[in-house]
Image: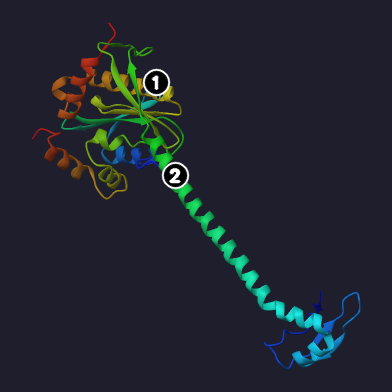
Amino acid sequence: MIELSKQISWRGRLRDDVYNVVPLESGIWSNKCTAETEILEEAGPIFEDWLKDVPNLISSVADEVRSRLMVYTRLENIENKLLLINASVTELQKSQSTIVLIETMAPEPIEIVRPFHVNIEPYEDEYQAFFLDANLCAYGNTKSAAIWNLKDLITATFQNLCEINEDKLGPGPARQLKILRNFIRIKA
Amino acid sequence: MPIITKELALKIAKKLKAEIKNRPGRPHDLACIYEDGLLIAQFGLRRGSKKNLGHDHVPNSLFISPHDAREIGICNRYRDWYIKTLRKKGYIKT
């Protein structure tokens, strides 16, 4: 309704400032004054009504800010909860373990004496396959790659242990060989 | 980020004076640690150019904790400490 020119300050902040009321297109008001009363006198009842509306306007702006703040707070809470859920899902995915029965060591030159189970779990951005009994673990980009790599490691470890005289094996490797012999043997 | 990367696993192998058995064309090399002619531990070293390839199996294969394995890799602990620890744990016959 009324536009105040940029160079003036609103009354109450700087009382002595000159108020410059710029008229609307209708050209009703155009005035310079030093006090609110003069503005009111010159501007007439419409301006007086507008001034009376200011507290209401401020209160409605405050209401709006308050309601937006509440919405923002709610959104922030939802965002936090989502992050927690996301972390829980990731944790659950990590703990997802697949158990695979190994019945062949092909193409390795190793025979299965007794099929054995290996565990596969997500690990970083790949998979980790481990043969717990023999304390062996390998990795791969996919579950099958992890199993292939584990088979390779089992073969390498077993062949190496078999090449060494048993009396040259420490308790750890000797135990590993004993366990592996329960499950695999070198192809004749 | 893995606890033990390939870079660290290689450092551990070097610190423990491991004998590396290269297996060209295969996914793993083998690092074997001997003491007085006895094989006391061995672990797989993944082939690949990435320095941060996960090698979190190394501590288990060495019969020590991940913390101790890292300490060896970053030169806070040495082969003597490792041999002493394995003796205490019974992984080396006295």
**Contact? badges 1 and 2 (CB < 8 Å):** no
Label 1 residue SS: helix
Front residue of this view, candidates A176 and B79: A176
The tag earlier along the polypeptide, 1 or 2, is: 2
Place of residue A89 in the rendered image (x, y in percent of width and height, measured from the top left): 43, 39
Q: What's the residue at 13%, 34% (across, down)?
A: B92
Place of residue A58 in the rendered image (x, y in percent of width and height, measured from the top left): 65, 74
Front residue of this view, candidates A114 and A90: A90
Question: Type of residue at label 2?
Answer: Ile
Report the residue marked by disc 1: A148
Q: What's the residue at 29%, 48% (across, down)?
A: B75
Any part of residue A5 in sight:
no
Q: Is residue A33 above or below residue A188?
A: below
Question: Type of residue at label 1?
Answer: Trp
Q: Is residue A2 above or below residue A16?
A: above
Q: Is residue A44 above or below residue A62?
A: below
Q: Is residue A66 above or below residue A166?
A: below
Report the residue marked by disc 2: A85
Distance from the alpha carbon under mark 1 to that under mark 2: 34 Å
1 and 2 marks on the same chain:
yes
Place of residue B65 in the rendered image (x, y in percent of width and height, measured from the top left): 24, 42
Place of residue B87 in the rendered image (x, y in percent of width and height, measured from the top left): 13, 38
Position of residue A98 in the picture relative to residue A168 (left or right): right
Position of residue A139 in the picture relative to residue B70 (left or right): right
Front residue of this view, candidates A121 and B51: A121
